[in-house]
Amino acid sequence: MFSCTSGNDTAPTGHTGCLCHRPEIQSLTRRINTDLSRRGFVAGMAATMASLGLPAVARPVSTGPARPVLFTNFLLFDGTRATLRQGLSLLVEGNVIKALAAGNPAPPDGAQVIDCKGQVIMPGLIDAHWHAIFAALPLQSLMTADVGYISLAASAEAERTLMRGFTTIRDLGGPTFALKQAIDEGLVSGPRIYPSGAMITTTGGHGDLRALSDLPRQPGGPLSAVEQSGAAMIADSVGEVRMRVREQLLQGASQIKIVGGGGVSSPRSPLDMSTFSEPELRAAVDVARDWNTIVTVHAYASPTVQRAISAGAQCIEHAHLMDDATARMMADRGTWLSIQPFLSADDTVPLTGPSREKMLEVFAGTDTAYKLARKYNIKTAFGSDLLFSAALAPRQGTMLTHLARWYSNFEILKMATADNAELLGLSGPRNPYPGKLGVIEEGALADLLVVKGNPLERIELVANPDANFTVIMKDGRIHKNELTQ
């Protein structure tokens, strides 16, 4: 597309005109043509051009080193303590918190000073179950729209996610590697992304959205459309599981998402079904362990959850239908629970048929699941898992406030900051952002919010970030500042 040749042709003898016959431009053309068909506009344009050392087509969001920033006159929620601290100043240099000290020290030369006017500083929020590509576009668009449009829409939603105060997300399935790269390189604004890559499922499992005309599947045959998109990969044997897990890790997955059972948005996969056998799940866990990271397993029903725990999974996604014995097993093994507080139809897109019936099952199980998590002191993470709606995605903070049914405001804020960061840390060497997240302390990564009001008293403040978050900083860079001097 960027060459007057096919990308495989050799330059005509004596050609001295356009640059398209240069080897690096032909290589660029081949990579872009491939990447656009699989990974989208961001991969094909921004990431590929950057990898070849060529100028980016988009102006970076930020260039050069960030100025030091000194915050003064604030109350501090540090992510771990139940009370606010006062009389402190906070200095950010580069992308880390350089100093957190009592009093009012002189700012460094060239520093920006922000008087917080007595407002609360807290760590940036973390969503442990998000889908950066799928959050804001209707499923029909995701299935039919041009891949460039999908990538641009995901980029716009990434910026909105950051502006809701979520400075970090754990992506639980989708082709987010290129979007993550573009955000990390400053080409677009968005949260830190801990990518899983394609979720790995079986034939007939959640995420297998193939048309029935695509059956039967031939092992080793051509990939289906959903697999080519990078949304999901189908594996039906131990060997295929190992291969698909390795493929995601090769591309930069920080953790692996395995689909252990049925799901709501896949109409042909009932919630009570189990997909992978225990040996297949164990194969995924073994490969992830070889790469020094973890597997998280999508599972709703008790037998599915128990199978995943027995296979060595370090985290379970959902588990809304688990029983007492399963919760006790989870606590005994130290397995994390990443669960979403789905309460009513307000928390989902409109559903019909089998998907609606399954969503009602989830609603009915939410209260019991959270009560069991509290009863057994299960390590619990917050995630929102909002899908397929630009109108629904802004409820990310509202979903966090739902937790007030079971937790104190302090416990909620700690879960969405320090606790979620602990879960992310299980990625070990595969952690794409080495450093402390979810806390405000010296040496931690500088992701923070300034809140107009006290969220320890009024958790509802996080549901209206436009009005209540006056400063949003990620990685030491200010993305929003209403506290002008």
Image (cartoon, grey):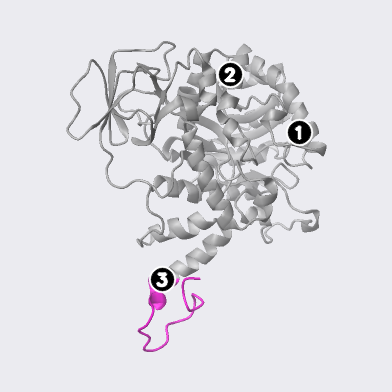
What's the residue type where badge 1 is placed?
A: Leu
Q: Is residue 477 magenta?
A: no
Question: Foreground: 377 or 442?
Answer: 442
Of the two numbered discs 3 and 2 on the same chain, state the one appearing first in sequence: 3
Cα distance between the residues tagged 1 and 2: 22 Å
Q: Quadrant of residue 204?
A: top right
Residue holding disc 1: 271
Q: How packed is label 2: few (under 14 Cα within 10 Å), some, or many (20 or more)?
A: many
Query: Quick check: 394 above or below 182?
Result: above
The secondary element bearing badge 3 is classed as helix
Q: Quadrant of residue 90?
A: top left
What's the residue type where badge 2 is placed?
A: Ile
Q: Is residue 25 magenta?
A: yes
Residue 398: give x, y in percent of width and height: 58, 26
Residue 2: give x, y in percent of width and height: 47, 71
Q: Nearer the viewer, mark 3 or mark 1?
A: 3
Residue lying at 71% horizontally and 47% vertically, measured from the top left: 208
The extreme bottom residue here reads 13
Residue holding disc 2: 378
Q: Which mark is residue 25?
A: 3
